[in-house]
Image (spheres, rainbow, N blue to C red):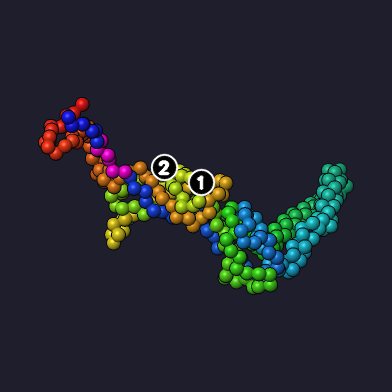
Amino acid sequence: MAALVLFPLAAPAAQPLGCLIEPFRVSEVGSPVIGVVETILVERGDLVTAGQALATLRSDVERQSVAVALSKAQAVGELQAAEASAMLARQKLVRAQDLANQNFISSQALEQARAEAAVAENRLAQVREQRGVFMREHQMAQAQLGLRTIRSPITGVVVDRYLSIGERVEEKPVYRVAMVNPLRVEVVLPSSFYGTVRRGMPVTITPDFPGATARTANVTLVDKVIDGASNTFRIRLELPNPDLSLPAGLRCKADLGLTPAAAAQKSAGVKPAPAQSPGLRLTGSPAQGPQPAVHR
């Protein structure tokens, strides 16, 4: 008697797509001013944080400008003299008013005391304004000195150093810094997937790296234009890398969990077909002939 063997109808599996893991951001760090490199503070491969000093330029003139401006801003002799003159003029005016009330001095002498007090007050205000100008000049000198220090705009790793001590800095950058946490993943998808990928959607990324396990990245950008020549579009994902265990530049596989056919149906708004019941096929001796299919 022939045996009945159950063969389930397997659905086509989703094929992972090739992708590339890149630094989230890369900065070519230069100097806003022209100068000569005086010190090198970090080297290739060093981890840096945003705002950290990477190198300095020669700044002898700028340091002296800061010192001169600071001396002017801290000078108090002229201010104290103006305050003393204003106080004395106010006291003279009070005495003159008392004497005028007793008719001991003329109104002309009283007006003269008032004018002297007003001049002293204006002089004091002028000295205070000048002191404020000196303080702003000191701040400007400090800002000019700060431009001689090259700082990292991002937190990441130093990829390359282009200049050495003594070299002149003009338009060429001094460092290249890459942000490696998070990482950026670029994926090229066929147009059949368009409409199925949304921002924030999780995607499983498997790096092509020994010992690396699958990780979850989130979609941050979906192209709004499909390339007509290749009939594809690109998406960008953000891949967390807090322990910096993954280097940038790796190839990877992206699994969206959709087959091209399912993606096309979802994009077109078609509901997936219901799962077919497993069929039965009869196996046995050819002499026995075919038998009808049996469903359980």
Which quadrant of the figure contains the C terminus? top left
* Residue occupying image coordinates x 31% and y 53%: 190
Q: In the rendered structure, which segment of residues is drawn in magenta?
A: 8-13
* Residue occupying image coordinates x 28% and y 61%: 229
Of all residues shown, which one is farthest toward the top?
296
Crowding at mark 2 (Cα within 10 Å: few <14, some 14-19, many 20+): some
Q: Which mark is residue 240?
A: 1
In the rendered structure, which disc, 2 or 1, sits on the residue that comes first in sequence? Answer: 2
Q: Position of residue 121 (x, y in %)?
A: 77, 53
Q: Nearer the viewer, residue 76 or 12?
A: 12
Q: Nearer the viewer, residue 285 or 240?
A: 285
Quarter of image, res 273? top left
Quarter of image, res 146? bottom right
Q: Is residue 177 visible?
A: yes
Secondary structure beneath dot 1 equals loop
What amino acid type is highlighted by mark number 2? Answer: Pro
What amino acid type is highlighted by mark number 1? Answer: Pro
* Residue occupying image coordinates x 25% and y 43%: 265
Q: Nearer the viewer, residue 124 or 14?
A: 14
Crowding at mark 1 (Cα within 10 Å: few <14, some 14-19, many 20+): some
